[in-house]
Amino acid sequence: MNDELEIVRGFLHERLGIDPARIVPTATLEELDIDSLMLLELFFEFEERLDVNLSQDLPTPRTVGQLIDIVKRLRGAPTAG
């Protein structure tokens, strides 16, 4: 989960000033104040940084861990479960 988690931490710290220590797999996107537009921007960040192609029918994650699992599936990497 390291690459993906670090991307999320860096992105949210830079864009929203969120303390990276708060950005853990169990944190909900709601408690981090991630709205649908910011989630879309995060997906685009993953697309650019990790060279993954996003489909239009992605599930909506509720936690940072779910978001990372979605990206891992797109990359063909093992997920956390």
Image: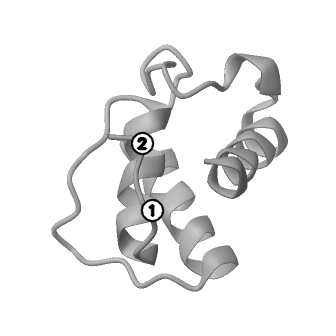
Going from N to C along the chain, the mark reached first, 2 or 1, is 1
Residue 35 vs residue 61: left or right? Answer: right
Rendering coords of residue 49 (x, y %):
69, 75
Q: Mark 2 packing: few (<14 Cα in 10 Å), some, or many (20+)?
A: few
Locate the C terminus and report the quarter of the image it occupies. Answer: top left
Rendered residue at 44%/58% (across/down): 40
Rendering coords of residue 57 (x, y %):
16, 68
SS label for mark 1:
helix
SS label for mark 2:
loop
Residue 45 vs residue 69: left or right? Answer: right
Whether residue 35 is visible: no
Rendered residue at 80%/46% (across/down): 10
Asked if labels 1 and 2 touch by Cβ distance under 8 angstroms, the answer is yes
Hey, which quadrant is residue 60 in on the image? top left
Circle nearer the viewer, 2 or 1? 2
Rendered residue at 83%/44% (across/down): 14
As shown in the figure, which amino acid type bears the numbered disc 1?
Lys
Rendering coords of residue 47 (x, y %):
54, 77
Residue for badge 1: 72
Of residues 38 and 59, the one nearer the viewer is: 59
Rendered residue at 38%/73% (across/down): 74
Residue for badge 2: 80
As shown in the figure, which amino acid type bears the numbered disc 2?
Ala
